Amino acid sequence: MAVTFESEDSLHLWLDGATWKQLALAAATHGFYRLTSDLVVIDGAVIPTGVAIVSSSVSTGMEADFQAAHVTLTAAASQFPGYEGTAIFRPGAAGQWMSIIRFRTEPQLSAWLGSHQRNEVLPPVRSSLTRDFAVYAKTTPFGTTVRNVDGKPQMTPSWKTAMLLLMVLYPMVMLMSKYVTPVIAGLGAEPWLSVWLVQVLSVALMQWWLMPTAASWCRRWLDPVDGASRRISLRGAAVAVIVYAACLTTFATVEVLQFWN
């Protein structure tokens, strides 16, 4: 059965309403249960829409206080439209407590993360931590990592994104000029068309393969929280400079790669 609403707001009003909840409970008593999809989270990949994963380092002996504070936090979140639940996991190999908060849509999740209601009930959670918690990051296809820490967005510094972009763009342009442009021109395409076709292919490769792959390799360096220290930033920049030097040396000395010969 499919049900259509006139607007998104009307749909959320129905799904969050008492009538729908009562009907769902009544249906369960007759063997009709609600079915939700699995939540699959892959390290380094984009987190599913409407889901926030929070990493917390809890002080020794404060575990009970941390869990009690989350009861209050969850009660406050449940009053927001689209709230679907919270799950808390004890420390694993990384030694971090993990909290997963689910909302029906990304805007609804953002509304909760940036709300004054959330900020009012966070102090008891923070008092049980050794350091402030951090929401897991989302990385755009072009290498900018976005985190929402304490309700405030933090992004990869633009200079890091620019260095990563240049690290991928230069060798790709050189190889395209050597191997792809002559093939397109050989098919009879005019220069104005061949340049456009090469750019289409280049953007597609960077959007869906090259940049996501390079960003995953540089994930910690790009992270605005984990990679914020001067040591990590300088180390990553040094690696990027080494890659630049390697690419320049390769294309300057390997004649088979030189499109101008």
Image: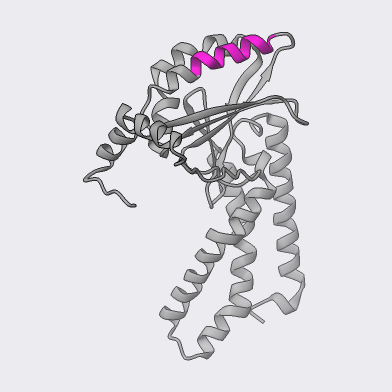
Q: Residue at x 28, y 42 (%)?
A: 8
What is the x, y in percent for residue 213? 64, 55
| Color encoding of the figure | one colour
170 relative to 3, above or below:
below
In magenta stretch: residue 4: no
Q: How many labels, in total? A: 0
Task: Write down the region rendered in magenta.
Answer: 62-73
Q: Quadrant of residue 212?
A: bottom right
Quadrant containing the C terminus is bottom right
- Seen at 70% across and 25% down, the residue is 96
Tell me, yes or no, whether the highlighted magenta stretch contains residue 69.
yes
**Residue at the location (69% across, 49% down)?**
217
- Residue shown at 71% from the left, 62% from the top: 248
Where residue 54 sits in the image (x, y, percent)? 59, 28
Decide which of 114, 36 is in the foreground and name it: 36
Q: Say whether residue 106 is left or right of residue 53.
A: left
Name above or below for residue 98 compared with residue 58.
below
Whether 50 is drawn above or below 244: the answer is: above
Most foreground residue, 119 or 214: 119
Between 236 and 123, the one nearer to me in the picture: 123
Residue 2, how many percent across, how many down? 32, 52
